[in-house]
Image (cartoon, rainbow, N blue to C red):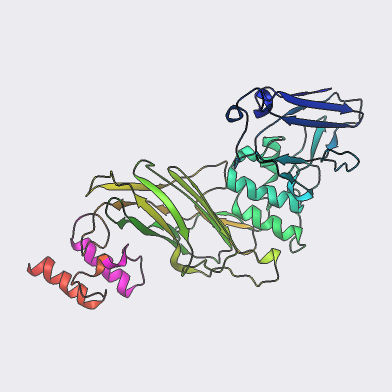
Amino acid sequence: MGVDFSGTPLEDWELVQPRLKEGSVRINACPDFYTGSTSDTLFTPATIPEQIARLMFEIADVDTPAFLPVIFGDDTSSLVEANAFATIDGPLTRLGVSGVQDGGIHVGGPTECKRGDVNYNGLTYEVADWVLFQQFLLGGPGVFIYDPRYQMCATNANADSLYGTIADLLYLARVILHDAPEIPLRGGEGGWQENSSDELRLVSSSTHPGEVVSVPMWLSNSTNAWGTTFKLVFDESALSVERVEIAQTRIEEWEEVHPVINPGELFFFAFDNWPLSDEVNRSIGAGEGILVMVDFRVDESATPGTYLPIAFETKEDWGHYNAYADTTGTLFVQPPTVSGWIFTDVISGDANSDGIVDLADLVYLINYLYRRDVPPSPVSLGDFNQDGEVNLADVVALINYLFRG
């Protein structure tokens, strides 16, 4: 019946031509460079998809409930390329089959959520559903532009009553590859679990203002893990994330590693991509150790000798942060979390980065050396005798300092 551009980036474009035909609509649009400023009309790449138009439909009499598909055509009979956009320099980018997401309209209802139909096209457990699920973890609920409540419900691929988790993503991949059955009605054998013996810990660290410090993320897990996720928040005026490193960590061989870095926050999810490749399952076994290293830069304006807190955050509507999934994709484990900080000074012997050299540092250093516990960050904080190594000699020197002056 028509196309509505109000409230979209195309609203201010001067050359916008929707062409309606029976069974199809074509939209050609561009700003008028000759009469206006391009800075006011162009829009830049965005993580979350932008709505650029609303199609207005009139629904004929149909048997309800029904799903009426609306798909992207690839009409080659016209001189105008379909499903494409041009850059400011002129090159044309064709979206192609992999760059578009078909949808449709559910008529009648109420519409029952179809588990696995993340892209809202009436078909469950497709590769396109898995791709959109990944975009959801990267960009948040804003990627669900058709029917957000329905699409969020559809993310519960493993039927554990939790939506949008890393376990759902992994189970969805298994179903697509016929490695697991669809679960249309009832829950699987796994489910949600909070294991008190597990722990996700941010290791408190020390550095000077203006410098970068690699902060370890420590995971103790009682079950084999195939995927993991966490969310950190911090003061963006004092701290920024430069990168996330997985070299020499517990997940260094995983193929899918996605840090989402924004001012004041870091969302991270990763998994081993073995279901979508010929590789073997590279899950991390039960145990403990460094999950990843997060490189933080302390702003030069930060006050020396202060604590800059970094905290775990939990959100129910975006990936269920701070968790890991088992190798079946049916068990979702949320360990207790321990937040930390960056202390803006470096004091030899201050193993726990609390700004004071005391008995707590002695215990911390002994646990690190002889119980394979959380390391100082940086490790050189444990080098109390300044000989270039962290070993028993540092424990003895620290004992002498604390108890013999």
Q: Residue at x 68, y 28 (%)?
A: 31
Q: Is residue 276 visible?
A: yes
Q: Is residue 162 visible?
A: no
Quadrant of residue 273 within the rendered picture: bottom right
Q: Is residue 165 left or right of residue 150?
A: left
Q: Residue at x 77, y 38 (%)?
A: 112
Quadrant showing the C terminus: bottom left
Quadrant showing the N terminus: top right
- Camera-nearest residue between 343 and 92: 92
Q: Is residue 14 left or right of residue 284?
A: right
Q: Is residue 88 left or right of residue 198?
A: right
Q: Position of residue 344 (x, y in %)?
A: 26, 51
Outermost front residue: 34
Q: Residue at x 78, y 48 (%)?
A: 96
Q: Residue at x 21, y 75 (%)?
A: 387
Q: Position of residue 27 (x, y in %)?
A: 79, 31
Placement of 237 over or under 223, stated as above or below: above
Q: Which residues are magenta?
A: 355-380
Placement of 335 over or under 45, stated as above or below: below
Q: Position of residue 384 (x, y in %)?
A: 20, 69
Q: Does the magenta-highlighted stretch encompass residue 363?
A: yes
Outermost bottom residue: 392
Q: Does the magenta-highlighted stretch encompass residue 82?
A: no
Q: Position of residue 278 (x, y in %)?
A: 70, 71
